[in-house]
Amino acid sequence: MKDIRYISAVNEALREEMERDETVFLIGEDVGHAGGSFGATRGLLEKFGPGRVLDTPISEAGFTSLAAGAASCGLRPVVEIMFMDFVTCAMDSIVNQIAKMRFMFGNQYTMPIVVRMPEGAGLNAGPQHSQCLEAWFAHVPGLKVVTAATPYDVKGLLKSAVRDDNPVIFIENKTLHAVKGRIPEEEYLIPIGKADVKREGRDVTIVTVSRMVSESLLAADSLEKEGIHAEVIDLMTIQPWDRETVYGSVGKTHRLVVAHEGVKQFGIGAEISSAVTEEIFDELDAPVIRVGAPFMPIHYSLEKACVPGARDVSAAVLAVMGRPSSEERNRKP
């Protein structure tokens, strides 16, 4: 085992897959000489050359469409969108073309594209650089949507995404790039579509993704002091999500909180809570509670007030358990 930063694990995954398969290539803004805006592709231009690490003009629609054509001809492009917010410029390519090509052409060819993009707040970068838009892509048939919370998970999932014959939207929260963790020296893969139980518990299930995994684990630590044992599930794959693991946990705890950084309205929490209510309603002892950001742009100077964290998860768990929050307990009569 070795210690590694999240962003270095991304770099290792890309390098290993490019060494393994010469059809894998990288394309995007500043992925070459600059090594990527966050350092994910550092050193790869020097190792593999400009034929496989392609710096592009500022045209997300252009280079994402190029990747679609390359994939249909047998290559395996990995596209980097500098900030997730900028993917709006490439929505036609991704949603109307890439997601539908295998279906429209009777599965005559595959569409092995990975579209990497950093999401989320934490850098005080303002409302046009801080969004979490994963629910958009999870709503589109033909796309797989993946996000990882640890260096171990991001490397294994990214390697699986590169090998997948379907388009994968691969989301990395910017605040996780500096996080350290342990990974094996030898190669490993993590399957797409399988959730991971990060912490076992018996009283309530917390289903979460990305940055909110660590926040939910912090919440679980504090809740244990109050005698509440929370089970924390990292969904990892948002589409297709692991119903079996989630339903099995809810069948054990009979209570559910879903936490994500994106806005609460119409987010992935709405889908999960609706599916649980429709399909295993009798297992619930309390209504499902969602945790998400308020329905507003991320404010530059008030970012921390807009983004959910461990306290919000703890409050939701206390509510679903029918316990008063700390604010309620401390309120004067």
Image (cartoon, grey):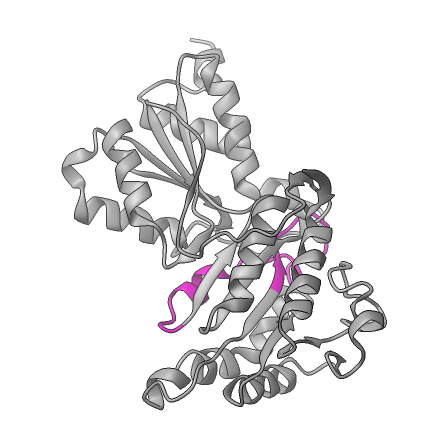
Point out the image quarter for the N terminus: top right
Say whether residue 192 is left or right of residue 285: right
Q: Residue at x 55, y 67 (%)?
A: 162
Please provide the residue range marked out in magenta. Answer: 117-142
Provide residue 144's location: percent of width, then percent of height. Answer: 43, 65
Provide residue 240's location: percent of width, then percent of height. Answer: 36, 59
Vertical placement of residue 31 versus 5, above or below: below
Point out the image quarter for the C terminus: top left
Provide residue 91's location: percent of width, then percent of height. Answer: 52, 78
| Residue sticking out furthest to the left | 282
Q: Residue 276: which quarter of the image?
A: top left
Q: Residue 13: which quarter of the image?
A: bottom right
Q: Does the magenta stretch include residue 134?
A: yes
Vertical placement of residue 215 versus 53, above or below: above
Say whether residue 305 is left or right of residue 100: right
Q: Can residue 273 be seen in this view?
A: yes
Q: Which of 37 and 124 is in front in this view?
A: 37
Q: Which residue is drawn at 43% across and 47% down?
A: 235
State the count of labels: 0
Provide residue 26's location: percent of width, then percent of height. Answer: 68, 74
Q: Can residue 309 be seen in this view?
A: no
Q: Is residue 119 magenta?
A: yes
Q: Nearer the viewer, residue 278 or 79?
A: 79
| Residue sticking out furthest to the top | 333
Q: Residue at x 60, y 45 (%)?
A: 152
Q: Which of 106 and 333 is in front in this view?
A: 106
Say whether residue 95 is left or right of residue 27: left
Predominant SS along the magenta part: loop
Q: Nearer the viewer, residue 90 or 243?
A: 243
Vertical placement of residue 171 versus 82, above or below: above
